[in-house]
Each structure stands twice: as structure tokens, then as C-alpha cells.
Image (spheres, coloured by chain):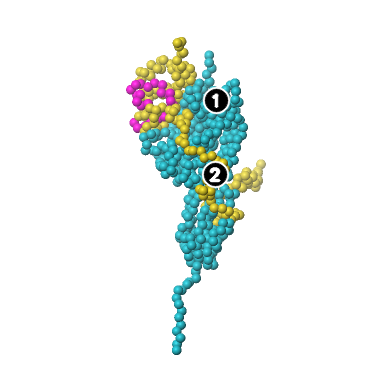
């Protein structure tokens, strides 16, 4: 008699919970998938697992991105001991053709649209599967990993339990590394829930040996028209063949968020113009300030010269320590005393981020003249009395 | 024994020591949120041209973006959808163990209408759906469903969903015995 791999199923709690989100366990029984769906209610769900045997199991967590279902709630979820993910739910649909690309786009109005739940997290476990850990990191120590569009990030991949070539047991001898991307909604800073703006890159790496691998300098490749304004994420996934029919499952994955470089416009203060003082409505409009950043304006006498330390304009200082890029409008309040002497002045907008060793970087600047002398265009004539 | 309150304070301070030093930098406005020891700016923020040049200099190949490959073990591949009254529920593929011909149109491989949790869908549609607890051996396809049960399904005329501990599950077909050619 042939021994069947025993089915190690998860014992869900006896009381059925209601909720549309669910954990799906896929267990391969002689190559055939057996699917078991367990509902997850609220923000927390617990499942208890017996030791796994046989061909291994895939655990998937599904949640709905659905306007009928709390569209902007923040869900903190994860499967097993694998890292948690933060997912903001929304239902806005945006045409990514604006970005000049057309990818695997499913727009809400198309005939092909199906109200399917989103796969939030997935993990594959099994005693005969290779094991891998994959970590992405950048100069910003924040977790989840993130970087600025112009900065490189690094990847560490370690692979264990890969079968040697010619292994009589015929285990899995190859791990492939795939790289995917998702654009984010530029204002909401989350992926488009309808699956728009997502794709893969046509390069794939294969690993056939156990060991630790590292790539210290990887640049984001998001196909944005302006690469320094790219806003999205890239995911590296280590996959192994599992279950025949060219099927693959992930054994490790890591995602890095890519945030755009900020920009700033100085308003109501024109370059080269002459003023008697800083206009009261002068201000700076900043976009996409890095989530961990301090941005401020400084003023100094003279033409713009990078490397100058000026007087910091207190009203302009804005600091963020959060999870997504920020916009800000700050006033430029400069008193008469701070521009006592007439002449050319420069105002620079600077930003300090985890990059560039936390040295300020210049975002924008403007030079103008302060001139309080009153010129009277008149001629003085004297008449000699005779 | 009385413990002097100072000891508590000292212990409390000790316990909080690792966190005190790393208080997150606050968000806010005004000169007080400036980091100490500011240096002069050394460069402008990177523009597109400079970034492209730096990326090329790093030896990065420029992979082409391609549509995402169909995912293995995807929700669409391994689900069956049952629908009624503009609502639907997702079930594991192979979990419908009996379906009278009259109800066949309520089973689909596509999701349509409003998604509803399986438990709620079941409550709302009790008049034509029932569940049947199966054993692990039946799930694995080692033993068939009991004949008596199958007859009961046919008599009741409802769609029957296999469950294990209350949750829906695939039931693999029993392999047909190999016949000699």
C-alpha cells in the first residue's frame, strides 16, 4: 500500500467567526491542492497549526479592498511568524496611462473586473522545502524598508536546505529570484487596489547553491516618466517550484518602498526683483517631503552659493517623522532687522533626510534685491537772479 | 517589608533607559524641531539626469517592465464562487460535493456581485445550501463519501458544501481503480 502524505490541517477555533477576510491553507496531497478557508474577523485572527508533513503547505491571507467595506481602514495583518504588513484600503481607481505606460491594468469599469479579495501575505512551509531569508535595507533604518527614489538599497539573501545536484532523493535544487513593482497612488501613497500599475521586470536570477548572497547597491527601476518622482514599491521574491505544472511558491520575500524626491516652490518672491523688505505673503510650497525629514529655509546676503550657512527662517521649519511623504506650505517671515543692509539676498530651501549623512540638500532657491533708498528722478535747477 | 519609593523610581528609570535615549524625533513646526549641529548644504537634490547617470554607472541592467505573471495557487485558480441575489461567496475549489442540476447555474468560476462572507451567505441561503462535515480520509480522497449520505443529498435537493470543523474544504476525488487494458 502506498503511504499517503498525511494531511496536516489547521484547527480553526471551534466558534465560527464572521468576516469577509480569510486565511486560505493550500495543502498538496500527491500534487493535488486541498484548499481550506478559515475566516478572520476584525484585525486579529489566530490559527493553530499541527506539525506539517508531506509536500508542505501554503498559507495565504486574503482581504477585501472594497468600498462597501470600510474603504480607508488600516489593516495590520500577517500570516504566521512572517513579518507584518500594513495595508491601507481604498477603492479609488486611477488611470495609469497617465504614467506613459500600460501594464497589467485592470480598471474598475472593464468587463474583466471581478470583486476578488487581495492577497495580503503568503508563506510556504514544509520540511522538505529549501528555506530562505531575504532582507532589503537602505540608509534609512525605518521598518518596513524604504528609500528615496534616487538612493540605492541593498539586498541580503541566504538560502539553506537546497538539494545538491544529483541528490538521490531529488529535492529542490534551484531558487529563483523575481522582482516585481507596484506604483502607489500619488496622494494616498498605497497601491492601486484594483491591481493597476503593477508589473514585473523581465530579469530573473537563479541560485543553485546554499549560501549567503548580498547585493549592496540596487537602484529602483520603477518605469516612471520622471524616475526621481517615482512613488511605489519593489518586491524581491525567492521562489521554488512546488506542486508541478511549472507552479512556484514563495519561500521568502521583501519589499522596499520608494518615495519621491521632494520639490519646493518659493512663492511671492521673484528672482531678480527689487523689494523694500520680504513681502508678507512670501511662502514655500513643498511637495513629497520625505517621511523622515526636516525642511527649512535660510537667508543670506549675496548671490546663491552652495555651502553657505545663512540665517534660518524660523517660520519655515517643518519636521516629519511618519510613514508616508508629506506636503507642507510654510510662511517666510523675515523681519526688517534681518535684512538691514540693502543688496542682493538669497533664500534657499534645504531638507535633511536619512540620506547624504543627514547633511542638508538644497531643494530650491531664489535671489532678489533689497533696496530701500528712495530715488527721486528730478533735476535741480537754480536760477540766478540778476 | 517596606521598599523605599526611591528604589521604585530608580528601577523604573533603569527599565526605561534603553528607550529614553532613542525618543523619536518629533514632527512639528518652528525652530525647536531643528536637529542640532546643522551643516551647510553640500549639494542640490538629485534631478532625473543625474539619477539616470548614477544608476547607469552602478552597472545596473535596465530590465523591461512586463505584465505580472499569473500567480500559482491564485484565488481565481483555486476557488469556486457560488452566487445568488447579487451576492457571492468564495469557496475552495472542489468543496461543492453535491449540486442538483437545477442549482448548477449558481456555481461559477467567476466572482460577480457583492462579496459576502461564507458564513453569512450560508445563513441567507439555507433554503438551498447545506453543509456536510467530512473526514480527513475523505478529504484526501482515500475513502468515498458514504453512500447513505449521497442518497440523502439527492433527496434533499440542495447544494452541499464539504466542511471540516465548520470551515469549507476541498474533497479530492477518489482515484478510479486502474483497469487492465
Residue A356 versus residue A69 in the image, above or below? below
User: In the figure, B5 relative to B63: above or below?
Assistant: below
* Classed neighbour count for the residue bearing mark 1: other residues with Cα under 10 Å, few (<14), some (14–19), many (≥20): some
**Residue at numbered disc 1:** A52
Label 1 vs label 2: CA separation? 44 Å
Identify the image quadrant of the C terminus of chain A.
Answer: bottom left
User: Does A277 sit above or below residue B95?
Assistant: below
- Residue B124, above or below B149: below
- Residue B92 colored magenta? yes
Q: Position of residue B58 (x, y in %)?
A: 57, 43
Can you give x and y, in whole percent of width and height, for residue A117 in the image? 43, 34
Residue B55 disc label: 2
Residue drawn at 48 percent across, 36 percent down: A200
Chain B drawing hue: yellow
Return the residue found at the far left. B102
A363 part of magenta stretch: no
Badge 1: chain ID: A
Residue A77 appears in view: no
User: Chain A appears in which tint?
Assistant: cyan
Q: Which of A314 and A308 is in front in this view?
A: A308
Question: Which span of residues is magenta-colored?
Answer: B85-107
The lab-note entry on whether marks 1 and 2 share a chain reads no
Single out the mark in the foreground, 1 or 2.
2
Mark identifier at residue A353: none
Residue A130 picture location, percent across and down: 57, 28
At 49% from the left and 27% from the top, the residue drawn is: A247
The chain carrying label 2 is B
Which residue: 52% across, 26% down?
Answer: A242
- The reply to whether the C-beta atoms of the residues labelled 1 and 2 are less than 8 Å apart is no
Question: What secondary structure is found at the residue carrying circle 1?
Answer: loop
Q: Is residue B39 visible?
A: yes
Determine crowd level at label 2: few under 14, some 14-19, many 20+ residues with C-alpha closer than 10 A.
many
Amino acid at each position: 500500500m502506498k503511504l499517503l502524505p498525511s494531511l496536516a490541517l489547521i484547527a480553526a477555533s471551534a466558534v465560527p467567526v464572521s468576516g469577509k477576510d480569510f486565511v486560505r491553507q493550500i495543502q498538496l496531497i500527491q500534487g493535488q491542492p486541498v484548499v481550506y478557508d478559515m475566516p478572520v474577523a476584525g484585525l486579529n485572527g489566530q490559527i493553530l497549526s499541527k506539525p506539517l508533513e508531506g509536500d508542505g503547505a501554503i498559507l495565504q491571507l486574503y482581504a477585501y479592498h472594497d468600498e462597501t467595506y470600510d474603504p480607508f481602514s488600516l489593516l495590520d495583518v500577517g500570516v504566521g511568524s512572517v513579518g507584518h504588513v500594513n495595508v491601507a484600503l481604498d477603492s479609488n481607481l486611477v488611470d495609469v496611462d497617465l504614467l506613459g505606460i500600460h501594464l497589467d491594468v485592470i480598471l474598475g469599469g472593464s468587463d474583466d473586473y471581478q470583486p476578488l479579495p487581495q492577497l495580503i501575505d503568503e508563506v510556504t512551509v514544509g520540511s522538505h522545502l529549501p528555506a530562505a531569508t531575504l532582507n532589503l535595507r537602505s540608509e534609512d533604518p525605518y521598518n518596513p524598508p524604504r528609500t528615496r527614489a534616487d538612493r540605492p538599497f541593498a539586498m541580503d539573501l541566504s538560502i539553506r536546505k537546497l538539494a545538491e545536484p544529483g541528490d538521490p532523493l531529488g529535492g529542490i535544487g534551484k531558487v529563483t529570484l523575481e522582482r516585481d513593482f507596484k506604483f502607489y497612488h500619488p496622494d494616498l501613497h498605497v497601491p492601486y487596489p484594483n491591481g493597476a500599475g503593477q508589473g514585473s521586470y523581465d530579469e530573473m536570477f537563479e541560485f543553485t547553491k546554499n549560501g549567503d548572497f548580498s547585493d549592496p547597491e540596487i537602484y529602483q527601476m520603477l518605469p516612471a516618466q520622471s524616475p526621481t518622482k517615482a512613488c511605489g514599491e519593489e518586491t524581491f521574491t525567492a521562489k521554488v517550484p512546488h506542486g508541478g505544472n511549472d507552479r512556484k511558491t514563495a519561500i521568502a520575500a521583501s519589499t522596499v518602498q520608494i518615495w519621491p524626491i521632494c520639490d519646493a516652490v518659493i512663492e511671492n518672491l521673484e528672482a531678480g526683483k527689487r523689494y523694500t523688505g520680504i513681502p508678507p505673503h512670501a511662502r514655500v510650497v513643498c511637495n513629497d517631503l520625505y517621511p523622515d525629514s526636516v525642511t527649512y529655509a535660510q537667508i543670506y546676503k549675496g548671490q546663491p552659493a552652495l555651502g553657505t550657512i545663512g540665517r534660518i527662517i524660523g517660520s519655515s521649519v517643518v519636521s516629519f517623522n511618519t510613514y508616508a511623504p508629506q506636503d507642507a506650505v510654510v510662511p517666510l517671515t523675515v523681519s526688517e532687522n534681518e535684512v538691514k543692509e540693502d543688496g542682493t539676498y538669497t533664500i534657499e530651501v534645504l531638507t535633511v533626510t536619512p540620506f547624504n549623512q543627514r547633511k542638508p540638500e538644497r531643494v530650491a532657491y531664489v535671489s532678489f534685491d533689497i533696496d530701500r533708498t528712495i530715488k527721486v528722478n528730478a533735476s535741480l535747477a537754480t536760477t540766478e537772479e540778476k | 517589608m517596606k521598599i523605599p519609593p526611591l528604589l521604585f523610581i530608580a528601577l523604573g528609570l533603569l527599565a526605561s533607559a534603553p528607550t529614553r535615549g532613542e525618543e523619536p524625533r518629533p514632527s512639528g513646526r518652528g525652530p525647536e524641531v531643528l536637529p542640532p549641529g546643522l551643516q551647510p548644504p553640500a549639494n542640490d537634490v538629485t534631478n532625473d539626469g543625474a539619477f539616470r547617470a548614477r544608476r547607469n554607472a552602478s552597472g545596473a541592467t535596465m530590465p523591461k517592465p512586463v505584465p505580472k505573471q499569473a500567480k500559482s495557487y491564485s484565488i481565481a485558480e483555486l476557488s469556486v464562487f457560488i452566487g445568488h441575489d447579487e451576492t457571492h461567496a468564495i469557496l475552495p475549489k472542489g468543496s461543492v460535493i453535491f449540486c442538483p442540476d437545477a442549482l448548477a447555474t449558481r456555481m461559477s468560476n467567476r466572482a460577480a456581485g457583492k462579496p459576502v462572507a461564507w458564513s453569512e451567505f450560508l445563513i441567507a441561503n439555507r433554503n438551498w445550501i447545506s453543509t456536510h462535515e467530512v473526514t480527513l480520509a475523505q478529504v484526501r480522497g482515500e475513502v468515498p463519501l458514504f453512500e447513505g449520505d449521497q442518497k440523502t443529498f439527492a433527496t434533499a435537493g440542495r447544494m452541499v458544501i464539504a466542511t471540516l470543523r465548520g470551515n469549507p474544504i476541498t474533497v479530492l476525488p477518489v482515484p478510479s481503480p486502474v483497469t487492465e487494458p
